[in-house]
Structure formats: structure tokens, C-alpha cells
Image (cartoon, helix red, strand yellow):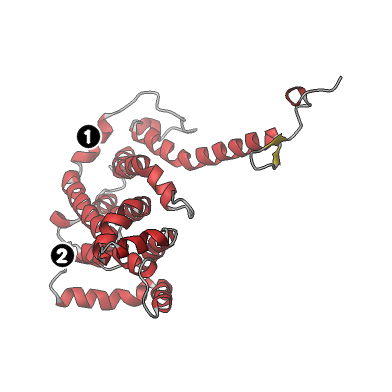
């Protein structure tokens, strides 16, 4: 009596829809490895939260405790009150939102020209744009500072926001690779129907390019939110400084005796929470936009 496929030996490879075979334990091993890697990445975040909720005495204890014996939520309020946190937070939000909006718009328009429009020398010009990725940042640092100083933009948000109005080579490359998958027949049909390049851009291509734009928005938001060098160079007054400079100033002005490490972990956790929420809200678009071949 022969065994049916359902009663076969447990190590018999499973057959996929495409005809290939896969052993059952290979997926289990892959999932275990992914869980272990995820826990390794989450360990610093866990330790940050645990340290933020500990007392000063428990922080000095050895060996350190894995979780606070008593939760001290007052560390968060004390950390917020130890600096003009809400002023820094407001400034960071304004700079980040403006940078994201301008970055998405400018890079989308440029990437559309390099992917959906046909014009002589398009690919050669695109190679020149990509070549700008290899220009070291220190080379442009002093000329850009002199330019902003001559324009009177020092101690304003303009040096942090205006560069996002001009396309970035990396973002253009990312959106262009996504738009190259767009069906050419749809673009030709829109042109035959009399749609201009701008109408095709906003009413035909834009709805389909939202995953790529969401990916660019996340990258731009993280870069602007965590930017330290820009605010350090161009912002001098406390009223216009961002969170990255505020935290650095807090760590430098606090003396060794009264420095509160738990409060530093508390305010650091408050700084990264918006980025974590942003990613989880747009993670579906981020995965589609960062994956080639995701057009439906």
C-alpha cells in the first residue's frame, strides 16, 4: 500500500506553486534568524526605555538590572523641564515637515523627467546627476556656508530647508527606478488624449508613484529630524535650534555630579518616538517603494 502525499515522510520537500521544492525546516530557520536579528536591533531601544525608568540608585547598581524594580515616570517630565524641549520640538517639526514636502516635490518632478519623458541625452545627464553622489560633503561645506552667510541666512531655517527644494541624486535615482516600471502604453495613451506633461505627471503617474514618494518622505524625514551638522553650523540662538542641538547642549552643560543619565535616556526616547511611529504608519508604502517590480 503506497503512502499518499499527505502521509509522506516529514522531511519530504514541499512543492511550491512554481514547481520547485522546499524543505519544511528551511522556513523555520529563516524565521528564527529574523527574530534573533530583530531582537538584536531592539535591544538598544529596550535598554533606553529601561534606563529612563530607573532611579539614580538603581542606575549605579552592579550588576545592572534588566528592568526597573520601581518605575519612575517622573524622569520624563523632569527631562522635558530641564531644557526648552517643546521649543526644540516645534522647531524640529517645522524644519522636518518643510524639508519633506520640498524633497518629495522636487525629486518627483526631476525623476519624472528622467524616466517618463523622452529627450536627447537624457541618460547621459542622469549619469552626471548620479556622479554628484561621489562629491565629499566637506568639499561643499565652506562654499555653502559662505553662500548662506552672504544671503543673510545664518541663524535661520533657510539653510536647512532650501536645499531640499533642489533634487538629490539618491532620491532621484530611487524614484526613477520605480517610475521606469510604469507602463509606456499608459503614458502614450495620455499623450494621445491630449494630456500635457504636467497633467500626466499629477493625474496619471503621481497616484501610482505614492509608494516611492512615501519611501523618499521617510528617508527625508529621518535625515532632517536627526540632522546635527546643519543646525550646528547655521543655528545660533536657542529659539531656532532643533532637538539634536538641544540634547547635545544638555549633555555638555550638565556637570558630572548632577548629570541625570536616566533623564537623558528619557528625552532621547521622546526624540525617536515620532520616527518609529512614522515608519510603522507608512511601512507598507516603504516596502513597496523600496522594492523594484512592485507596480501592479
The part of the image, by quadrant, that contains residue 166 is: bottom left
Q: Looking at this view, is 31 or 135 the one in front? A: 31
- For the N terminus, the quadrant is top right
* Residue found at x 43% / y 32%: 61
Circle 1 crowding by C-alpha within 10 Å: few under 14, some 14–19, many from 20: few
In front of the other: label 1 or label 2? 2
**Residue 173 in the image, given as x and y percentages of width and height:** 41, 65
Residue 218 can be seen in this image: no
Task: Check the image and report above or below for 192 versus 63.
Answer: below
Task: Check the image and report above or below for 225 versus 42.
Answer: below
Tell me the distance, in whole angstroms, between the alpha carbons under discs 1 and 2.
29 Å
**Residue 116 in the image, given as x and y percentages of width and height:** 37, 66
**Residue 172 in the image, given as x and y percentages of width and height:** 37, 65
**Residue 135 in the image, given as x and y percentages of width and height:** 40, 75
* Residue found at x 34% / y 25%: 71
Where is mark 2, residue-wise? 155
| The furthest residue to the front | 193
Where is mark 1, residue-wise? 77
Amino acid at each position: 500500500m503506497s503512502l499518499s502525499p499527505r502521509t509522506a515522510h516529514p522531511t519530504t520537500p514541499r512543492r511550491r506553486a512554481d514547481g520547485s521544492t522546499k524543505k519544511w525546516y528551511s522556513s523555520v530557520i529563516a524565521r528564527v534568524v529574523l527574530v534573533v536579528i530583530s531582537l538584536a536591533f531592539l535591544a538598544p531601544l529596550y535598554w533606553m526605555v529601561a534606563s529612563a525608568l530607573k532611579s539614580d540608585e538603581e542606575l549605579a547598581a552592579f550588576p545592572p538590572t534588566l528592568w526597573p524594580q520601581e518605575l519612575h515616570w517622573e524622569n520624563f517630565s523632569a527631562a522635558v523641564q530641564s531644557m526648552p524641549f517643546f521649543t526644540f520640538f516645534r522647531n524640529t517639526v517645522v524644519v522636518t515637515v518643510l524639508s519633506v514636502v520640498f524633497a518629495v516635490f522636487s525629486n518627483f518632478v526631476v525623476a519624472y523627467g528622467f524616466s517618463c519623458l523622452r529627450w536627447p541625452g537624457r541618460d547621459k545627464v542622469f549619469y552626471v546627476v548620479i556622479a554628484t553622489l561621489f562629491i565629499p560633503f566637506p568639499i561643499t561645506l565652506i562654499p555653502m556656508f559662505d553662500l548662506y552667510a552672504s544671503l543673510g541666512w545664518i541663524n535661520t531655517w533657510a539653510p536647512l530647508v532650501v536645499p531640499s527644494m533642489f533634487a538629490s541624486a539618491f532620491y532621484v535615482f530611487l524614484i526613477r527606478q520605480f517610475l521606469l516600471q510604469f507602463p509606456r502604453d499608459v503614458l502614450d495613451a495620455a499623450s494621445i488624449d491630449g494630456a500635457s506633461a504636467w497633467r500626466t505627471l499629477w493625474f496619471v503617474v503621481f497616484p501610482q508613484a505614492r509608494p516611492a514618494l512615501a519611501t523618499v518622505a521617510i528617508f527625508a524625514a529621518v535625515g532632517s529630524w536627526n540632522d546635527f551638522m546643519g543646525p550646528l553650523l547655521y543655528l545660533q540662538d536657542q529659539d531656532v535650534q532643533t532637538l539634536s542641538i538641544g540634547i547635545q547642549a544638555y549633555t555638555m552643560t550638565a556637570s558630572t555630579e548632577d548629570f541625570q543619565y536616566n533623564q537623558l535616556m528619557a528625552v532621547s526616547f521622546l526624540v525617536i518616538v515620532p520616527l518609529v511611529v512614522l515608519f510603522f504608519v507608512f511601512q507598507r508604502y516603504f516596502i513597496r517603494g523600496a522594492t523594484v517590480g512592485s507596480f501592479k
